[in-house]
Amino acid sequence: AQSVTQPDIHITVSEGASLELRCNYSYGATPYLFWYVQSPGQGLQLLLKYFSGDTLVQGIKGFEAEFKRSQSSFNLRKPSVHWSDAAEYFCAVGATGTASKLTFGTGTRLQVTL
Amino acid sequence: EADIYQTPRYLVIGTGKKITLECSQTMGHDKMYWYQQDPGMELHLIHYSYGVNSTEKGDLSSESTVSRIRTEHFPLTLESARPSHTSQYLCASSDFGTATGELFFGEGSRLTVL
C-alpha cells in the first residue's frame, strides 16, 4: 500500500521569502502525486498534480512541484510567499488505476510573517 | 469553483444521539468519498462510492454508515454518537470518467460529541 510522509509539521516564513515543503512517498510503481491546500475552516483545494511526463509541474497560485523518482519525493515550492498563502498543505499519493482513492500525508501548516 | 456542499458545518450533540451529515454535489460526479480529519493527522478515507447503490468501506474503520440512493447525495450517519466520534468529516467527489484523481472537497462538518 502507498504512504506519504510530510516531515515538517509547521513552517514559518517571511512574506516575500521562498518556500519549499517536503513530501516523500512510498509506492512500488509510478504514483499519481498531488498537493492540496486547506485554508482555515475550508475544504481542500487542488494546487497541482503529477501523473507522468515533465517532472516539474506548475500549479495555481504560483506554486510548482518537482517529482524526483530517485528520492521518492514531490516537494512543493514557491519563489515568493504571500501572506494569503498561510494555510495547511497536504501531499497525497494515488495508486495507478485508482487515482481518485488517495492517501494523504499529515499536512504541513504554513505560517507567514509580515 | 467546486459545487459540493456539506451540512451542518458545525454540530455539538450529546452521547447516544443519532446524527446524519449531509453531502451534496451538483457536478454529476460518480465517485464520492468521506474522509475523517483530526488535528495533526492525515485525512483517513472512511467511505467511498463509485455510483448509485455502490458503497464501500475505506481504509479507516468507522462505525458510521453511508448510502448512495441518488448520484448527487451521499449522507453519512452515526446511529449512536460517542465522544470518540468527535472529528471533522470531509466529503469529496470526483469525475469517474477522467480518472484525473482530482477530488473536489466540501467545507467539512465539524462534529463534537459531549
Image (spheres, coloured by chain):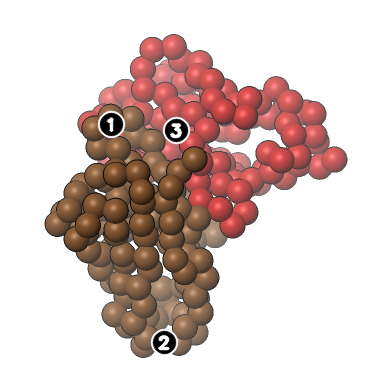
Give the chain coloured red: A
- Residue A33 percent location from the top left of the image: 41, 30
Residue named by callout 2:
B15
Residue ID at (28%, 29%): B98
Three-letter amino acid code at the position of disc 1: Ala
SS at mark 3? Answer: strand
User: Which residue of the protein is positioned furthest toward the right in this rendering?
Assistant: A114
Which one is in front, A43 or A70?
A43
- Residue A17 percent location from the top left of the image: 78, 28
Which label sits on residue B99?
1
Residue named by callout 3:
A34
Mark 1 or 3, closer to the camera: 1
- Residue B75 percent location from the top left of the image: 31, 64
Say if A5 sits above or below A71 in the image: below
Say whether marks 1 and 3 touch (CB < 8 Å): no
Which one is in front, B87 or B53?
B53
Chain identity of mark 3: A
Horizontally, residue A78 falls left or right of residue B27, namely: right
Tell me the crowding category of disc 2: few under 14, some 14 to 19, or many 20 or more residues within 10 angstroms, Cα based. some
User: Which residue of the protein is positioned furthest toward the front in this rendering?
Assistant: B26
Three-letter amino acid code at the position of disc 2: Thr
Mark 1 vs mark 3: same chain? no
Which one is in front, B51 or B25?
B25
Mark 2 vs mark 1: same chain? yes
Residue A5 seen: no
